[in-house]
Image (cartoon, rainbow, N blue to C red):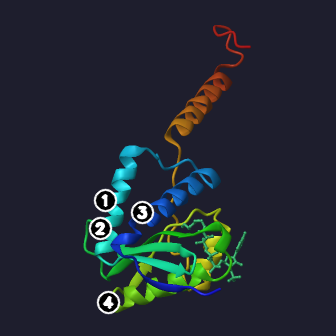
Amino acid sequence: MDFKIGHAITEDLETIKELNLDFLKEHNNRFEKRFRINKENEKRITRYLKECISAKNMLVARSDRGIIGCLTVTDEKHPLELCHKLAYIASIYVKPQFRNKGVGKVLLSKAIGQASDRRYEQVSLRVATKNDSAVTLYENVGFRTKFLEMECDTKKNACEFTEKLLKSFFKLFRGCPAIQLQ
Ligand SMILES: CC(C)(COP(=O)(O)OP(=O)(O)OC[C@H]1O[C@@H](n2cnc3c(N)ncnc32)[C@H](O)[C@@H]1OP(=O)(O)O)[C@@H](O)C(=O)NCCC(=O)NCCS
């Protein structure tokens, strides 16, 4: 399949916005409902994408059927200055009918090349651990897991903790005549 990688231009904005929304919806459906998609956030996405396009941080894969995939490569923001310059790749998305044909691999390789040209020493990204095809792709182009980002559900954990606490309390007082437990 023929396609070329290049920087997005202003005229691509609407198409890229659609791809980004598809990306967020797919993530919500396949992994976790994480992104709130509403009119207000659509405006935010549009503003963000405009900035990415004008900074030449948005790469697209174009075929004779239009844009078939995209990603952003930006500066990794960190409150403290890191020892090395780190770029951040986000929102890599290939339209479903064009997947597993190497588009993602070429997009990523170009993004790493661009980061290197801009004197970034390393490139990072986040991926859902269950996203097997994305993890395979990242490993294929040289990414390795260096850190684990962990999350816990505060409400679920608080309930489980209270439940455990109550159970051990009941266990402790089982048999005590003053407290009649079931
Ligand atoms: C992840 C994504 C960008 C990959 O794009 P792509 O154009 O299909 O990527 P490629 O064809 O270059 O490579 C895909 C690799 O995954 C492999 N793969 C496909 N399905 C797989 C699966 N279920 N398990 C493991 N590996 C899988 C392919 O075999 C291929 O590896 P290979 O080159 O060694 O054969 C695309 O699937 C996508 O847009 N997914 C939805 C958005 C998303 O999840 N983005 C990542 C966010 S972190």
Distance in Å between CA atoms under marks 2 and 3: 14 Å
Name the spot of residue 134 as percent of width and height, x first.
61, 71
- Quadrant into which the C terminus falls: top right
Q: Are marks 2 and 4 in contact (CB under 8 Å)?
A: no
**Residue at image point 31% right, 59% down:** 47
Label 1 crowd bin: few (<14), some (14–19), many (20+), radius 10 Å: few
Viewer-nearest of discs 2 and 3: 3
Residue labelled with disc 3: 14
Residue labelled with disc 4: 119
Q: Is residue 55 above or below residue 112?
A: above
Mark yes or no: residue 181 visible.
yes
Q: Which badge, 3 or 4, comes first in the chain's sequence?
A: 3
The kind of residue on which mark 1 rests is Arg
Q: Are marks 2 and 3 in contact (CB under 8 Å)?
A: no
Distance in Å between CA atoms under marks 1 and 4: 26 Å
**Residue at image point 41% right, 83% down:** 122
Name the spot of residue 92 as percent of width and height, x first.
51, 70
Ligand 1 quadrant assignment: bottom right
The kind of residue on which mark 3 rests is Glu
Name the spot of residue 109 as percent of width and height, x first.
51, 87
Residue labelled with disc 1: 47
Q: Which badge, 1 or 4, comes first in the chain's sequence?
A: 1
Q: Which badge, 2 or 4, comes first in the chain's sequence?
A: 2
Residue labelled with disc 2: 51
The kind of residue on which mark 2 rests is Glu
Label 4 crowd bin: few (<14), some (14–19), many (20+), radius 10 Å: few
Q: Secondary structure at mark 2?
A: helix
Label 3 crowd bin: few (<14), some (14–19), many (20+), radius 10 Å: few
